[in-house]
Amino acid sequence: MTRLLIIEDNPELVANLYGFFEPLGYVIDDARDGATGLRMATQNDYDAILLDLMLPRLDGMTLCRKLREEFQNPVPVLMLTARDPVDDRVQGFALGADDYLVKPFSLKELDARIKALVRRAQGRQVLGMLRWEDLQVDTRAPQAWRQGQPIALTPSTHKLLLCLMRAAPSVVRKQEMEYLLWGDDPPDSGALRTHIHELRQQIDKSFEPALIETMHGVGWRLLGPAATMSD
């Protein structure tokens, strides 16, 4: 089962994509503007994203840059565009796109490209696991292990922990975490601190050393030398 996010504002093309991919077993979500697409991409786990370049509210290039640089999200991105200038392709790849397809395109070719992207991503992240120090986290289910001990996460702490691990050892800003959980409508600032406290209780309270460090006035980060992929 491949989970696919389509970020495209052409309703006819979106309908055609649903009609072709759903019978093949794909599970599909779609967003008709860039801001909604970015929120969905950061709040949910997808195997691949189809991303149009010309979008309302937030263009595809900016969305891809934010997804990679601000949210450290490695999900495979295939850009769709009605244009074919070399500069666009070069810029897209520089911003973190994995593949590029010019409209109109063959749906069979698109299917083949998505499958290739998903296979490569699975090779980089075997069985959907991330490891940092003695902490291991399932990217697809709210489950973690530290020093071999199982830890049940909530959906919110799971999202926050994955965000920290993908960014580590860099700092994740408070605003990025709020957007990850609540999009453009975050509650009062105490709500995020409650979730961070809960995450610390889950992964730091019973273990040494503590991994989550507060960068006062900025955000949080994980302590340790480097992240590695693991099976």
Image (cartoon, grey):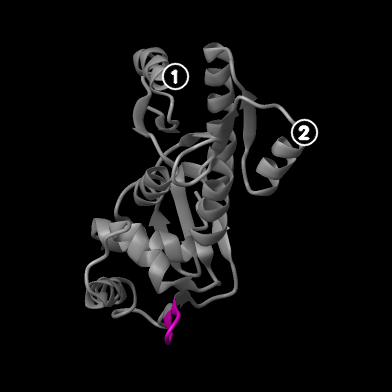
- Residue range corresponding to the magenta coloring: 213-219
Residue 183 position by quadrant = bottom left
The correct choice, above or below, for 161 with respect to 191 in the image is above
Label 1 crowd (10 A; few <14 / some 14-19 / many >=20): few
Q: Position of residue 59 (x, y in %)?
A: 52, 43
Query: Would you name the residue on which mark 2 appears?
Result: 86
Q: Is residue 158 rendered magenta in the image? A: no
Q: Is residue 206 visible?
A: yes
| Amino acid found under the numbered disc labelled 1 | Leu
Which residue is pictured at 42% across the width and 18% down the height?
17
Q: Mark on residue 13?
A: 1
Which residue is pictured at 36% across the width and 61% down the height?
179
| Amino acid found under the numbered disc labelled 2 | Val
In the foreground, 8 or 212: 8
Which residue is pictured at 48% across the width and 36% down the height?
49
Mark 2 lies on a secondary structure that is: helix
Quarter of the picture containing the N terminus is: top left
Left or right of 121? Residue 40 is left
Left or right of 214? Residue 95 is right
Q: Position of residue 53 (x, y in %)?
A: 56, 36
